[in-house]
């Protein structure tokens, strides 16, 4: 399953896969495979990405189009 919001938010903010991969301490290839759904995202990675982008995990997983965090 490809995650459009995950890729889209990175591209909208002009962030390279290489930079996010370094933040997650994974290779660029591994991060690319997260975006395309070849490798499943772990809870740890999802939490780090949601914190980094300040969006909900549901947004990253394309379960909503609303990136705002619910409090």
Image (cartoon, helix red, strand yellow):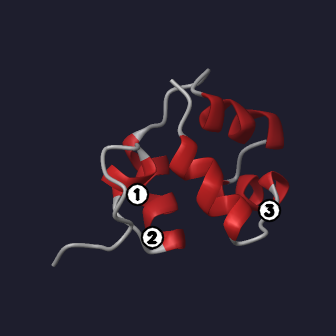
* Distance (Cα) linking label 2 and label 1: 6 Å
Element under disc 2? helix
Q: Position of residue 25 (x, y in %)?
A: 70, 53
User: From what the image shows, is residue 21 above or below residue 42?
Assistant: below
Between 47 and 4, the one lying in front of the other is 4
Residue at 81 percent of width and 43 percent of height: 28
User: From what the image shows, is residue 65 above or below residue 40?
Assistant: below
| Circle 2 residues within 10 Å: few <14, some 14–19, many ≥20 | few
| Circle 1 residues within 10 Å: few <14, some 14–19, many ≥20 | some
Residue at 38 percent of width and 55 percent of height: 59
Residue at 63 percent of width and 54 percent of height: 8
Residue at 50 percent of width and 23 percent of height: 1
Residue 19, numbered label: 3
The residue carrying mark 2 is 51
Q: Pick the quarter of the image with the C terminus.
A: bottom left
Residue furthest to the left: 71
As drawn, is 32 to the left or to the right of 9?
Answer: right
Q: Position of residue 12 (x, y in %)?
A: 69, 67
Instruction: Work out whether mark 2 precedes mark 3 in sequence or the reverse, and give the earlier one.
Output: 3
Q: Position of residue 3 (x, y in %)?
A: 53, 38
Element under disc 3? helix
Whether pointer 3 and pointer 1 mark residues with C-beta atoms closer than 8 Å, the reply is no
Whether pointer 2 and pointer 1 mark residues with C-beta atoms closer than 8 Å, the reply is yes
The residue carrying mark 1 is 47
Residue furthest to the front: 65
């Amino acid at each position: 399953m490809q995650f459009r919001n995950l890729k889209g938010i990175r591209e909208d903010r002009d962030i390279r896969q290489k930079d996010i991969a370094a933040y997650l301490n994974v290779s660029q290839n591994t991060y690319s495979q997260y975006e395309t759904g070849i490798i499943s995202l772990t809870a740890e990675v999802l939490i780090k990405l949601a914190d980094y982008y300040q969006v909900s995990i549901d947004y990253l997983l394309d379960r909503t189009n609303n990136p705002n965090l619910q409090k």
